Image: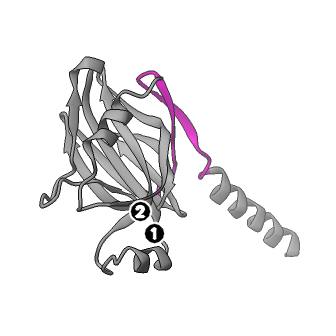
């Protein structure tokens, strides 16, 4: 009987851990990781350039989902798209000079309580300490390699347009 119980425990272990391995899927010219199965919490979403985007939280990590492809992000969860002040939708800017039909900015890595006090941020203001760009270029979605750190980036307060420009014009 003990042998049967031990065998069942090993089978359950293999079933759980082998079904959660990441798989790699190509997306445009950038490789991304698709997480299977997904026990992900959606923290934000956007529809831009005929595409839908979802920001997901999984074990403290942020993931950008476009269709069935997941792109890992550098900022820690929860993550949100920056909005233009007073708007409910994600802010997106096009840069035709670099063939970028949409530039979005994702913020994450929650701001510490001491920083919130220093900057007089109200409890309901959603802010992060890191920002990363998401680009739609030549029909493919790209996540920028550069990440802004050390600032305060708030979801509903907008962000300087130079940040969008900088992400869109980043060297690949």
Q: Quadrant of residue 2?
A: bottom right
Residue appearing at x 46%, y 73% in the figure = 115
Decide if residue 59 is on the left or right side of residue 53: right
Side (left or right) of 66 relative to 14: left
User: Quick one: SS at disc 1?
Assistant: loop
Task: Tell me the crowding category of disc 1: few under 14, some 14 to 19, or many 20 or more residues within 10 angstroms, Cα based.
Answer: some
Reply yes or no: does residue 26 show up in magenta.
Answer: yes
Residue carrying label 1: 111
N-terminal of the two: label 1 or label 2? 1
Front residue of this view, candidates 108 and 34: 108
Within the image, what quadrant is residue 126 found in?
Answer: bottom left
Q: Disc 1 versus disc 2: distance between alpha carbons?
A: 5 Å
Q: How many marks?
A: 2
Span colored in magenta:
19-40
Residue in the picture at 23% in, 62% down: 156
Residue 106 at what x, y percent from top left? 36, 50
The answer to whether residue 39 shows anywhere in this view is: no
Q: Which mark is residue 128?
A: 2
Task: Give me the residue at 38% from left, 55% from top.
Answer: 107
Residue drawn at 45 percent across, 50 percent down: 63
**Residue 3 position (above or below residue 91):** below
- In the picture as drawn, the residue positioned furthest to the front comes out as 118
Residue furthest left in the image: 86
Check residue 7 for magenta coloring.
no
């Amino acid at each position: 009987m003990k042998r049967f119980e031990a065998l069942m425990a090993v089978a359950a272990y293999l079933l759980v851990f082998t079904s959660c391995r990441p798989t790699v899927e190509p997306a445009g010219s950038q490789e991304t990781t698709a997480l299977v199965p997904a026990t992900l919490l959606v923290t934000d979403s956007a529809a831009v350039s005929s595409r839908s985007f979802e920001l997901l939280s999984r074990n403290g990590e942020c993931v950008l989902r476009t269709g069935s492809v997941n792109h890992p992000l550098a900022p820690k969860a929860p993550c949100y798209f920056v909005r233009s002040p007073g708007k409910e939708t994600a802010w997106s800017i096009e840069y035709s000079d670099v063939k970028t039909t949409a530039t979005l900015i994702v913020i994450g890595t929650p701001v510490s309580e001491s920083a919130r006090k220093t900057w007089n941020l109200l409890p309901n203001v959603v802010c992060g300490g890191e920002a990363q760009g998401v680009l739609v270029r030549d029909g493919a979605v790209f996540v920028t390699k550069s990440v802004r750190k050390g600032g305060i980036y708030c979801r509903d307060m907008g962000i300087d347009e130079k940040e969008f420009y900088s992400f869109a014009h980043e060297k690949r």
